[in-house]
Image: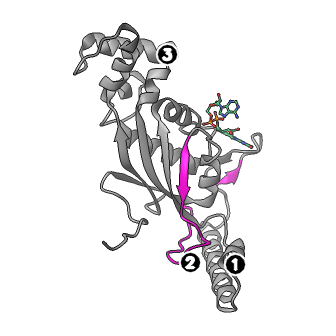
Amino acid sequence: MALKEINVPPPEHVRVLDGQGWIGLLNCMGTETTIVNAARVSFGKMREEMDERDVVLLKYMLENQHTSPLEHVGFTFIVHCPLFVRGQWHRHRTWSYNEISRRYTEINLEFYTPPTLREQAETNRQASVDPVSVDQNTGLADIREHNERSLALYHKLLADGVCREQARGVLPQNMMTTFWATVDLHNLIGFLALRDSEHAQWEIQQYARAIKQLVAPHFPTLKEILEWDD
Ligand SMILES: Cc1cc2nc3c(=O)[nH]c(=O)nc-3n(C[C@H](O)[C@H](O)[C@H](O)COP(=O)(O)OP(=O)(O)OC[C@H]3O[C@@H](n4cnc5c(N)ncnc54)[C@H](O)[C@@H]3O)c2cc1C
């Protein structure tokens, strides 16, 4: 059977970053019932479906850091994002990752152009405020031109016979990449607390919110308890 292209969002996906990025849910292992049943293993009992007492139990677990039952639920996402978002994401060591490699492929190169250029925050060195008071169109056109020049240099190096693993060094941080990311529910909640936060960079916040949209229909009680927005 022919190999399929992976740079295509799966059926369950959310587009982010002005439609330039996306995240898809490839696999979801377990349900809310899995979580409460895992908690009940200590009593040697299990239930087929959630009832009111299970909702109370789930709430108690989340409020009291009884988190190990959450580790029996897992997700695999496919993420299409700029390299700088990938760099932040991969700091989360409790996830497992596999990423497209520019040592193997030189096709489908895309670059992220932000919708708006934000101003550097004065007090917080890692924060930004919207929008910077330069001509936005000129700034964004400069970024696009830089992308095109980087790509042209990359192709020239390849045409000159330079290997892919060195030529890729001239590609900018806003190049899009694609990776699979697998995590259990406990560590996913930790990621969301850190990345759907005003302290995190705006771009990765958009992915964290998209994850909530993807996960919420599978875990509606959890969504209510954790007060995720619609
Ligand atoms: C707003 C923000 C700004 C940041 N700025 C920077 C920055 O400037 N520079 C920078 O380098 N990083 C920065 N980070 C990354 C940050 O330091 C963490 O690496 C990242 O958020 C992953 O968090 P984590 O370790 O909790 O996640 P995971 O790696 O998924 O780990 C989850 C939990 O598992 C445990 N754990 C995992 N690995 C270990 C280990 N080896 N030893 C002990 N316990 C472990 C810890 O309890 C940890 O909280 C920033 C993160 C955020 C959210």
Q: Tell me which label, 3 or 1, sits earlier in the chain.
A: 3
**What is the secondary structure assignment of the residue under circle 1?**
helix
Question: Mark 3 is on which residue type?
Answer: His
**Residue at 44% in and 15% down:** 61
For marks 2 and 3, give the CA distance: 46 Å
Disc 2 on helix, strand or loop?
Answer: loop
Q: Nearer the viewer, residue 193 or 98?
A: 98
The foreground one among 15 and 40 is: 40
- In this rendering, the answer to whether 22 lies above or below 169 is above
User: Would you say the magenta stretch is mainly helix, strand or loop?
Assistant: loop
Q: Is residue 114 above or below residue 121?
A: below
At label 1, counting other C-alpha atoms closer than 10 Å, the crowd grade (few under 14, some 14-19, many 20 or more) is: many
Disc on res. 167: 1
Image coordinates for residue 1, horizontal then vertical, percent: 30, 72
Question: Badge 2 local density, few (<14 within 10 Å), some, or many (20+)?
Answer: some
- The answer to if 43 sits in the magenta stretch is no
Which residue is label 3 attached to? Answer: 66
Residue under the image location 30 percent in, 23 percent down: 33
The magenta span reads: 95-120
Q: Secondary structure at mark 3?
A: loop
- Report the residue marked by disc 2: 106
